[in-house]
Image (cartoon, rainbow, N blue to C red):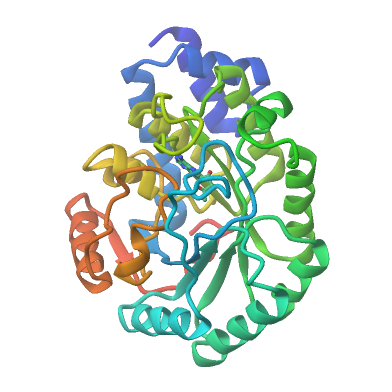
Amino acid sequence: MTDRVAALIQKLTTTHRLTLSEYTELIQNRTPKAAAELAKRAVKVRQEIYGNTVFVRGLIEISNICKNDCLYCGIRCSNPHADRYRLTPEEILACADEGYSLGFRTFVLQGGEDPFFTDKVLCSLIGNIKEKYPDCAITLSLGERSRESYQRLFDAGADRYLLRHETANETHYRKLHPSTMSLATRMKALRDLKEIGYQVGCGFMVGSPYQTAETIAEDLKFIEEFQPDMCGIGPFIPHKDTPFAGEAAGTLELTCYLLSIVRLIHPPVLLPSTTALGTIHPSGREMGIKAGANVVMPNLSPVTVREKYELYNNKICTGEEAAEARDRLASRIRSIGYEIVTDRGDIKKERN
Ligand code: 5AD
């Protein structure tokens, strides 16, 4: 590690910010030593805020029907090979029942932009889950909706919203999305969500086509300014039925490096070690935690639909029961010195 990189890491740790060109430098000049130093510092600040706790979220993939056509995504509307499904509100409630009995206190309802899930349908579903499980948080991850819609869902009881910004660079955004979508719309949605009062998550894929050290620097600058409560960062993994089928996947190494940087930019951030990270490497999720992540999101979707919710190929945990998955995950997390807790897992703005 050069003195210059060491100085950048020191500056990031103490001021929680770098300039765009400094972020670019930190990414371009990374070495295993620099990664280890960043991870050590990221783990230290996370420990000060969250101890050795790892939060779990029960992920319920409610529909793989999507009106969008994002070039990277396996459930894009123009993929005729996707085997489409939609869970009924009753099925979703049954997933929450199972999740609650397993100790999950946050449910993430994630899905494509499926017109079936109107405000009316979702408000009633959210109301039902909240009535039955008032001690649980509900996170939505359902893409772009109007501000009025976000408000109604919030008023119905939703607590958090995940909407990855995907890339903070306009030109890059256009290369990943159809012309009907725009970075401006995405950013407006994120601002609306925050103003309404949601705990908000942004995020991006690592190694997506056309991504450069400079575009990643813009993502980091955006995170620094937006101060999200959550941030989803996982490797891009090509899906065979998309225009990006032949592209390379993002790496474990760069993903972990960025997880550490994001932890240092915004120490209290809720940072998942993603399923995509677990997919590109057998111990990817553990390595993400060791780099500074503090959230894992096991799948509570019915086993019959798990492989249909295929954003990328070879997704893990498509064949096991939720209970089994939770036990195995808990022991894997314990084996690296952390504990999964039965808790909503809200962001902690104050240090212990
Ligand atoms: N590889 C990795 N992540 C993907 N996502 C979509 N497609 C892929 C892919 N091929 C991510 C996007 C989206 C989130 C739900 O999943 O960042 O926001």
Residue 195, quarter of picture: bottom right
Q: Is residue 330 above or below residue 293?
A: below
Q: Is residue 134 left or right of residue 190?
A: left
Q: Could you tell me which residue is drawn at 38 percent across and 82 percent down?
A: 100
Q: Is residue 163 above or below residue 243?
A: below
Q: Is residue 153 left or right of residue 207?
A: right
Q: Nearer the viewer, residue 5 or 211?
A: 211
Q: Could you tell me which residue is drawn at 23 percent across and 43 percent down?
A: 283
Residue 281, quarter of picture: top left
Q: Is residue 157 visible?
A: no
Q: Could you tell me which residue is drawn at 59 percent across and 83 percent down?
A: 125
The quarter in which the N terminus is drawn is top left
Q: Is residue 151 visible?
A: yes
Query: How far from the left and from the top, in percent, is residue 317?
Result: 27, 57
Q: Is residue 198 above or below residue 144?
A: below
Q: Nearer the viewer, residue 16 or 104?
A: 104
Q: Nearer the viewer, residue 125 or 117?
A: 117
Query: How far from the left and from the top, in percent, is residue 326?
Result: 26, 67
Q: Nearer the viewer, residue 125 or 251?
A: 125
Specify the farthest residue to the bottom. 132
Q: Is residue 324 left or right of residue 75?
A: left
Query: How far from the left and from the top, in percent, is residue 162?
Result: 59, 56
